[in-house]
Image (cartoon, coloured by chain):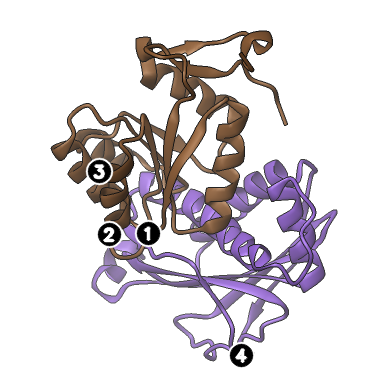
Amino acid sequence: MKMELIQPFINAADAVLSQGLKSPMSIGNLAMEPVAYRRQGVAAVIELTGDIEGRVIFDLAPKTAAQVASHFAGTELPETDDLVREAVCELANQVIGNAVATLNDQGFHFRVHPPQMHTSEQGPTSTEDTEALVLCFETESGSVFMNIALRYAQKTSAAGA
Amino acid sequence: MEQFSPIKRSKDGQPVRYLIVDDSVFARKNLGRIIETFGGQIAGEAGDGLTAISEYERIKPDIVLMDITMPQMEGIEAAEKIVQQNPDARVVMVSSVGYQENIVAALQRGARHFVQKPVKPEVLYEVIKYVLGEDGALVSAAGAGA
């Protein structure tokens, strides 16, 4: 996975989280995950298809999710509120949508599918083609994990390489 | 939240009526909250493009705020169908996928404007004023409750 694909996601997460939380954030750990994805809390997954395909998962500990959702909603939300899960989906939607907008303007063409809750404890194992990059954003509300597994689609791999 | 001078309908001084279309309940609630700070009224909500079309015909809102990425029917197609049936419809796309190709497609197919998510209330406020044109009137905060 090339940095040119990743940077727009980092920039978008920075912009969306900073605006929504009204406080700065920083990038914590960054790691390649060769093993299967393990869900940590409230997670939303968005699938991408087109020149680049794969999926991006946003994952927040329940307490962090409730705090982030409360910031975005402008009102206190308990961890059990359905709106907390909706907020994580919308957060993922906004970050990935903004990143995709940047990549599309750079000439990559792909489609974002509506976000879905990621409910299984474990995702598919990464492969050589779809190794996952895990980014941890440190916010005042806690850690926000973004797990990105993307690859150039077969039909355009020569052009995109 | 920031305070805005209420925008009312010029013809009768009533609140501007909005149809909010987004597959995310959270996004709809957030947009609704912003709209209320503009003095607007949420006339209806829809979670996909198909429902948006039927809701438009049912409530005939002054403005539609329409997401793009949705199940069943995406926002640009729904906007096109609404405008085909109602040439005066004012549809504002509100989406995070704001790349040039998408924006151009939305405008060519009938949308009046495009607002990037995350929505900044002050940006949406200016867009609403622009899209309403002479059909919208600003009311001083003191007279808003009258």
Q: Would you say the residues marked 2 and 1 are in contact, meaning their CB atoms lie under 8 Å apart?
A: yes
On the same chain: label 2 and label 1? Answer: yes
Q: Which residue is mark 3?
A: B57
Image spot of residue A74 (x, y percent): 73, 45
Q: Residue under mark 1: which chain is it in? A: B
Local secondary structure at mark 1: loop
Q: Nearer the viewer, mark 3 or mark 4?
A: 3
Q: Which mark is residue A122?
A: 4
Callout 1 amino acid: Met
Closer to the camera: disc 4 or disc 1?
A: 1
Classify mark 4: helix, strand or loop.
loop
Separation (CA) of disc 2 from disc 1: 6 Å
What residue type is disc 2 on? Met
> Three-letter amino acid code at disc 3?
Glu
Camera-nearest residue between A74 and A46: A74
Viewer-nearest of discs 4 and 2: 2
